[in-house]
Image: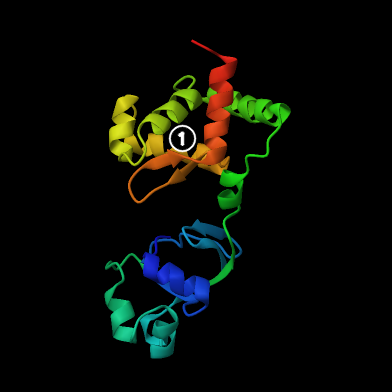
Amino acid sequence: MLFTHDVLVKIASGDVDLAFRRRRTPAVRLGSTLRTEVGVLEVDEVAAVSEASVTDRDAQRAGYATKPEVLAHQRPGEDRQLYRIGLRFVGADPRVSLRSDTDLSAKDLDEIVAGLRRLDARSGHGPWTTAMLELIDANPAVRAADLAAGLDREKLLFKVDVRKLKERGLTESLDVGYRLSPRGRLVLDHIQRSNPT
């Protein structure tokens, strides 16, 4: 689910705790979590509802002034169902603290690199983790499409791989593009020291 920055801030503060989406199937499940720029959200309600059941109070809880306003922002289509989705802020994204955790021993670094090598081994397009870290390091704040072209990769698949690095606290997203986190910088330095060219 996508939210504007303003809505995310309101969810984090507790001012917004509902969302409405008209979809063919719900994009989230009860109990699932969403990692966002403001932290982790938990889905605590997913219910198919009729437009008639939506109230002005529901609209306000979703960040809109009135019921007609929330309904006007829904996708059209007879084949789509309106879903009411309850949300609550559950805390900071654990990847944020992981990115700045650089208190790593040589053994820790070796284990992280071994995990990256496992990603490389499972890849359908060959080893990519070191090349991706080096590319992001050399090109911070560059659009994903441009970075993907530099590796002759399709943008969406490239972004999937970047997310794998982000899960390990090695990269962070910027308004445009990415950069290495302090942890990512340390890991890349370790790789380069271990494999001098």
Q: Residue, x 37% and y 38% (percent of image)?
A: 140
Residue 85 vs residue 106: left or right?
A: left
Q: Nearer the viewer, residue 73 or 193?
A: 193
Dot 1, how many residues are within 10 Å of its Cα: few (below 14), some (14-19), or many (20+)?
some
Count of picture labels: 1
How has the structure been colored for display?
A: rainbow
Residue position for label 1 = 161
Depth check, front residue: 71 or 149? 149
Query: Quadrant of the image for the N terminus?
Result: bottom left
* Outermost residue to the bottom: 56
Q: Which picture quadrant has residue 73?
A: bottom left
Q: Is residue 183 above or below residue 21?
A: above
In the image, farthest residue toward the top: 197
Query: From what the image shows, is residue 59 above or below residue 7?
Result: below
Q: Residue at x 56, y 22 (%)?
A: 191
The image position of residue 148, as x and y in percent, is: 33, 31
In the image, what residue occupies the spot 49% across and 24% down?
Answer: 130
Residue 185 seen in the figure: yes
Q: x and y percent of residue 48 in the render?
A: 47, 73
The amino acid at mark 1 is Asp
Residue 95 location (% of width, % of height): 57, 49
Question: Element type at marker 1?
Answer: helix
Whether residue 85 is visible, yes or no, is no
Along the line of sight, which residue is nearer the eye, 83 or 70?
70
Give the residue at x 45% y 74%.
10
Q: Is residue 16 left or right of residue 168?
A: left
**Which quarter of the picture shows residue 142?**
top left
